[in-house]
């Protein structure tokens, strides 16, 4: 198998380069096939070197005293870049100092060779530090990079020499792992001589690198030397010159800072206590093989997982616990059983990991541990049971499911026998959240009458007792139907659930709607017919007992009838007396739906007692349409029919007419009265019933006969074909007319009035003609006493209508009256007949 070659690139200051024709810094040689854009965009930013200040200040001429800058990072296109920059003194001119960078570009397909072998990164010795222009601008590809690790066997001792104890090393490892996802950089300043800084940094990094899981290494970038902190893309850890970590430097306030010269660590919030992976890494820091074994375990478990999961520090804490348990460290599990199961479940929930062989084997291992603990009479915690059930629900291992059912039954039996009812309740609660496992468990229980008594009846009672609303009760029935239909056939559950449902139903305000909703619920529920039918019969019996017929609306009445019509005849034979009476009244009123024409109330209510009639009348009143229409006319008299204590029949006519007018308006009132003229209950021979006639009279007299003053309505009322009704209208009109209209409305009276008018005029003329001229009074003579004549009264004209209104005792005459008060021939003392 041919492997892809490793490509090279040289960068320094020369007379000319690959990309420039004059002197300056540029790529001076490269392997053919290395993309120009990749060189410029990816490699050039890392081809840089700033000599340490202290070495520059003393003009250090020993080139080996200058630290080398080893860089390693992963490009966005997948390649791994491994390079080194070193100080090389004077350039080709001999006048300017310069540096030389040599980078290897490792194909993406080969990077795991380096990732899994840290010595192939930190032990590479095949870096060049100069290039001869005469050799051209092309470099050959290479198949391998010779490397050899220089780390001592006792790595903890090395760490101690560099100033790292256990806690500081854990802080550094935690910061490095966190930096991959937290967008924070790690800046380290070692307390060593500048000449040894690069070597120390490389050794420390190799120790850290061996502790990093492989997936983290695939994203990790570092630089072993920089004159001061700076944020560079792809670089997570940077070693800087001593004294360069200072406020206002090239780092942010949130970056992880390790200034060992000053003994200062900033922004690393590592809590006290156990840190599963950090503890493991420190424990095995001197055993690279043990670390590599764990990293291989992580690779197998996380194969195909999302990057968001594989880069989290928490992931490796959890996997470390699972790894140690797999290796036999039961103490890790016993410290937190529920937490271990929860961690395992987190990975099984990942679609890519659901069938991971290593995880499934761990699942079985943990389960067998719990079975052994139970055999030793050690009951699990409720939370552990919940996590175990979740895990079993995620697994497709049928054998494990069956074993889990047996395990749960044993836990329940032991919990109840030892009086730990709280644990038993928790087990039931968590088990019910897994319908399939719950059903399997209950099916096993129902195969044993002893287990039914011990594990089912008490639990079912507890569940039913916790239900407080009718909707909750229906959901409870749905739960048992779906998970354990065997319960619906058990007499205990049938009796308990029916009683509970009826109690909750009795508390409902709208009982009819509640009953209908329950019927609909069971209509849509599969596999429950044998349970539902007797329950619904009891429900309908309860409905008839509790319902108030007088309060049924039109829609509710129709729903009630529809409900009863579906019941078999045998159902009605089981009703008590009161319920049977209600049922009969309902069905009797329901016959009105098919009745044609007017029904005489006496016939309709013939078989019923007065209080029963009253209930039915209220039901009929509630059934009437609002607004009233012609279809309701036949039912209105039924509502206002009354029978007194002596058996005399009658109607409340005035209230009936008022009801029609208020609930139908004038149009409906007109139609209703016209309809009553054709009904025998309102007439007697050719006349209206006296009581009905009086009610109509009062109706038309309202507001001074307003209904008859309107010309259009007066015409409409006169179109009603009934002689007595028209006569009634005339009476109302006559009674409400003004006096003058009453007078002129009578023909004879009008003639008499004209005669009186003529007579009055003649009398007035005669009186005026008989008056004598008044002579001037004679001059009074002294001493003469003459009698004073009486005052002369002047006659005044009085209009005839005033005589008629102000002198009602004046009687009209048929002939002109004679003078001197003589009667006219044929006159009498009686008033003239009009």
Image (cartoon, helix red, strand yellow):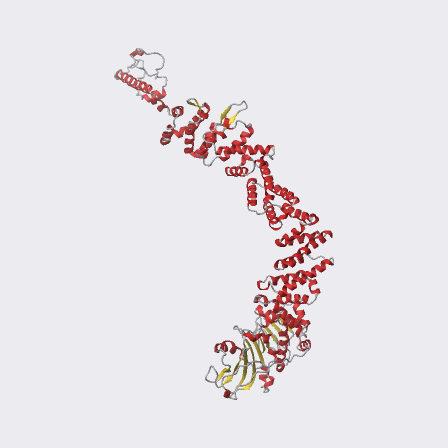
- Exactly how many numbered labels are in the figure? 0
Compared to residue 761, the image places residue 242 above or below, namely below
Compared to residue 438, the image places residue 96 above or below, namely below
Residue depicted at x 60% and y 87%:
62
Of residues 242 and 165, the one drawn nearer to the viewer in this rendering: 165
Q: In which quarter of the image is residue 346?
A: bottom right
Q: Where is residue 495 in the image (x, y as percent from the top left)?
A: 65, 42
Of residues 589 and 684, the one drawn nearer to the viewer in this rendering: 589
Q: In this view, does 500 lie to the left or right of 834?
A: right
Q: In which quarter of the image is residue 756?
A: top left
Q: Can residue 679 be seen in this view?
A: yes
Q: Position of residue 542 (x, y in %)?
A: 60, 38
Q: In which quarter of the image is residue 120?
A: bottom right
Q: Quadrant of the N terminus?
A: bottom right
Residue depicted at x 57% and y 64%:
352
Of residues 646 and 144, the one drawn nearer to the viewer in this rendering: 144
Q: Quadrant of the C terminus?
A: top left
Q: Is residue 226 visible?
A: no
Compared to residue 598, the image places residue 300 above or below, namely below
Compared to residue 364, the image places residue 97 above or below, namely below
Q: Position of residue 796 (x, y in %)?
A: 30, 20
């Amino acid at each position: 198998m041919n492997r892809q070659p490793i490509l090279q690139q040289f960068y320094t200051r020369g007379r000319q380069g690959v990309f420039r024709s004059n002197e300056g810094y540029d790529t001076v040689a490269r392997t053919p096939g290395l993309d120009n854009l990749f060189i410029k965009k990816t490699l050039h930013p890392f081809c840089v070197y700033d000599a340490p200040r202290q070495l520059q200040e003393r003009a250090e001429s020993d080139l080996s005293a200058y630290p080398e800058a080893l860089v390693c990072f992963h490009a966005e296109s997948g390649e791994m870049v491994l390079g080194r920059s070193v100080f090389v003194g004077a350039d080709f001119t001999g006048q300017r100092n310069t540096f030389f960078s040599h980078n290897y570009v490792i194909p993406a397909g080969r990077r795991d060779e380096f990732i899994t072998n840290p010595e192939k990164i930190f032990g590479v010795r095949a870096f060049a530090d100069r290039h001869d222009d005469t050799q051209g601008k092309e470099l050959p590809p290479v198949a391998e990079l010779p490397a050899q690790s220089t780390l001592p066997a006792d790595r903890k001792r090395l760490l101690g020499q560099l100033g790292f104890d256990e806690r500081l090393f854990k802080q550094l490892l935690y910061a490095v792992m966190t930096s991959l996802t937290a967008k924070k950089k790690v800046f380290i300043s070692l307390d060593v001589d500048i000449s040894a800084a690069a070597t120390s940094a490389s050794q420390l990094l190799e120790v850290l690198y061996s502790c990093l899981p492989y997936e983290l290494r695939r994203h990790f970038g570092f630089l072993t030397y920089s004159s001061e902190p700076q944020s560079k893309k792809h670089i997570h850890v940077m070693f800087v010159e001593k004294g360069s970590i200072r406020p206002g430097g090239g780092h942010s306030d949130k970056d992880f800072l390790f200034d060992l010269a000053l003994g200062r660590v900033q922004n690393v919030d590592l809590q006290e206590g156990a840190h599963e992976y950090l503890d493991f890494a420190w424990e095995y820091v001197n055993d690279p093989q043990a670390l590599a074994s764990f990293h291989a375990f992580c690779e197998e478990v996380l194969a195909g997982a999302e990057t968001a999961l594989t880069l989290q520090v928490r992931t490796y804490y959890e996997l470390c616990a699972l790894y140690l348990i797999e290796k036999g460290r039961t103490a890790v599990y016993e410290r937190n059983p529920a937490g271990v199961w929860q961690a395992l479940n987190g990975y099984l929930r990942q679609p890519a990991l659901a069938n991971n062989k290593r995880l499934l084997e761990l699942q079985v291992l943990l389960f067998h541990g719990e079975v052994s603990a139970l055999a030793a009479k050690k009951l699990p915690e409720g939370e552990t049971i919940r996590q175990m059930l979740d895990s079993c629900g995620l697994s497709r291992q049928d054998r494990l499911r069956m074993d889990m059912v047996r395990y749960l039954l044993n836990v329940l039996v032991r919990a109840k026998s030892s009086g730990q009812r709280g644990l038993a309740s928790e087990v039931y609660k968590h088990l019910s959240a897994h319908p399939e496992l719950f059903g399997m468990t209950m099916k096993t229980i129902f195969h044993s009458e002893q287990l039914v008594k011990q594990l089912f009846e008490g639990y079912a009672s507890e569940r039913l007792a916790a239900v407080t609303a009718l909707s909750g009760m229906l959901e409870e029935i749905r739960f048992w139907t779906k998970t354990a239909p065997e319960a619906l056939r058990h007499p205990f559950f049938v009796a308990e659930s029916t009683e509970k449902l009826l109690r909750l139903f009795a508390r409902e305000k709208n009982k009819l709607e509640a009953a209908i909703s329950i019927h609909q619920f069971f209509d849509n529920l599969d596999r429950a017919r044998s349970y539902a039918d007797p329950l619904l019969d009891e429900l309908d019996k309860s409905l008839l007992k509790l319902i108030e017929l007088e309060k049924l609306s039109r829609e509710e009445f129709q729903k009630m009838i529809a409900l009863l019509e579906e019941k078999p005849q045998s159902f009605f034979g089981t009703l008590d007396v009161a319920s049977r009476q209600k049922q009969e009244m309902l069905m009797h009123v329901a016959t009105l739906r098919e009745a044609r024409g007017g029904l005489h109330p006496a016939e309709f209510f013939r078989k019923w007692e007065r209080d029963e009639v009253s209930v039915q009348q209220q039901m009929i009143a509630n059934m009437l349409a609002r607004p009233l229409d012609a279809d309701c006319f036949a039912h209105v008299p039924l509502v206002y029919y009354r029978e007194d204590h002596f058996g005399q029949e009658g109607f409340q006519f005035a209230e009936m007419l008022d009801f029609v007018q208020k609930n139908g308006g004038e149009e409906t009132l007109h139609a209703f009265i016209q309809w009553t003229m054709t009904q025998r209950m309102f007439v007697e021979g050719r006349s209206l019933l006296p009581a009905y006639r009086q009610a109509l009279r009062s109706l038309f007299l309202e507001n001074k006969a307003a209904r008859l003053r309107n010309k259009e309505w007066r015409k409409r009322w006169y179109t009603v074909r009934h002689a007595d009704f028209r006569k009634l209208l005339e009476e109302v009109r006559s009674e409400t007319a003004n006096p003058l209209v009453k007078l002129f409305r009578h023909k004879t009276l009008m003639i008499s009035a004209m005669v009186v008018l003529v007579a009055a005029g003649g009398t007035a003329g005669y009186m005026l003609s008989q008056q004598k001229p008044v002579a001037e009074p004679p001059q009074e003579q002294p001493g003469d006493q003459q009698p004073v004549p009486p005052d002369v009264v002047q006659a005044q004209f009085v209009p005839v209508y005033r005589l008629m209104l102000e002198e009602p005792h004046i009687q009209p005459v048929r002939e002109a009256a004679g003078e001197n008060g003589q009667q006219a021939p044929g006159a009498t003392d009686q008033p003239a007949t009009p």
